[in-house]
Amino acid sequence: MKKLLILPLVLLFLIACNSENEYKTEKLTLSKLKSLPYYQSFNVFWDKYLPLEDMVDSIKNNFDTSKYKLVLFLSPSCYSCGKADSLSPYILKAIYQTEIAESAYEIYSMPNYKSSHPYDEIIHLSNLPTFWLLKNNLPVNCVSDSFNINKEKFPESQKRIENFLYEALTEE
């Protein structure tokens, strides 16, 4: 009898989870991102972070907007996942301080890394947040992976996310 009562509840839950109100990938501007309540802690990290001035200048001098675009895939859930929660505000604050036009970077808020996004054909995500540098509309470097691999191999490393963006811009 209990199974018969539970079955309708499970079905109702499954239907509710697949409703039209389901959270989908959304393209955001930086100001929109900063204003969303579910990205509330983004601003805490943003406010406290001071990007390295020499890296900001180097990125500014090497980021040719006719060639490069930075695509950032974020999720509100990343703000409760531990070490990754500061990467998005850190890289975005560094980009913001370069004064590079907002048209040179795109921000996508996603429910999870398996969600559909406009770059599905050329970028396959395995986690969030993920930051891809595109050159001539093709992915050339996953900046967040480079950062995470370095942190894993060299836990004492003082290299910051903006160092990895600069390196990606100057690789040939």
Image (spheres, rainbow, N blue to C red):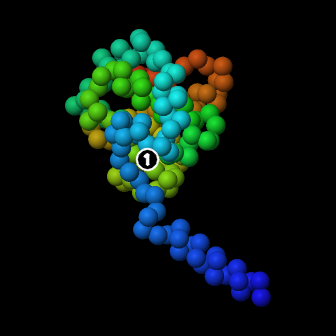
Residue at (57, 73) in percent of width and height:
14
- Badge 1: how crowded within 10 Å, few (<14), some, or many (20+)? many
Quadrant position of the N terminus in the picture: bottom right
- Find disc 1 in the rendering and name its residue: 109
- Where's residue 91, x and y in %? 45, 28
Q: Secondary structure at mark 1?
A: strand
Q: Residue at x 64, y 28 (%)?
A: 153
Residue 147: image location, x then y, percent: 53, 29
* Viewer-closest of 162 and 18: 18
Whether residue 101 sits left or right of residue 88 in the image: it is left
Question: For the residue marked with disc 1, what is the amino acid?
Answer: Ser
Residue lying at the far right in this picture: please name it.
1
Outermost residue, left side: 66
Q: Quadrant of residue 97?
A: top left
Decide if residue 100 is on the left or right side of residue 7.
left
On-image quarter of the C terminus: top left
Identify the residue at the far top of this view: 54
- 17 versus 142 height, above or below: below
Return the x and y of residue 2 as percentages of the image width and height: 77, 83
Task: Mark yes or no: residue 115 visible.
Answer: yes
- Asked if residue 40 is positioned above or below residue 164 in the image, the reply reads below
Q: Which of the 4 quarters of the picture holds residue 162?
A: top left
Residue appearing at x 37%, y 26% in the figure: 95
Q: As rendered, which of 47 and 59 lies closer to the eye?
A: 47
Picture layout, residue 135 above or below residue 124: above
Residue beneath the point at 48% across and 48% down: 125
Residue 63 point in image, percent of width and height: 30, 24
Locate residue 140 relative to residue 99 in the image: left or right: right
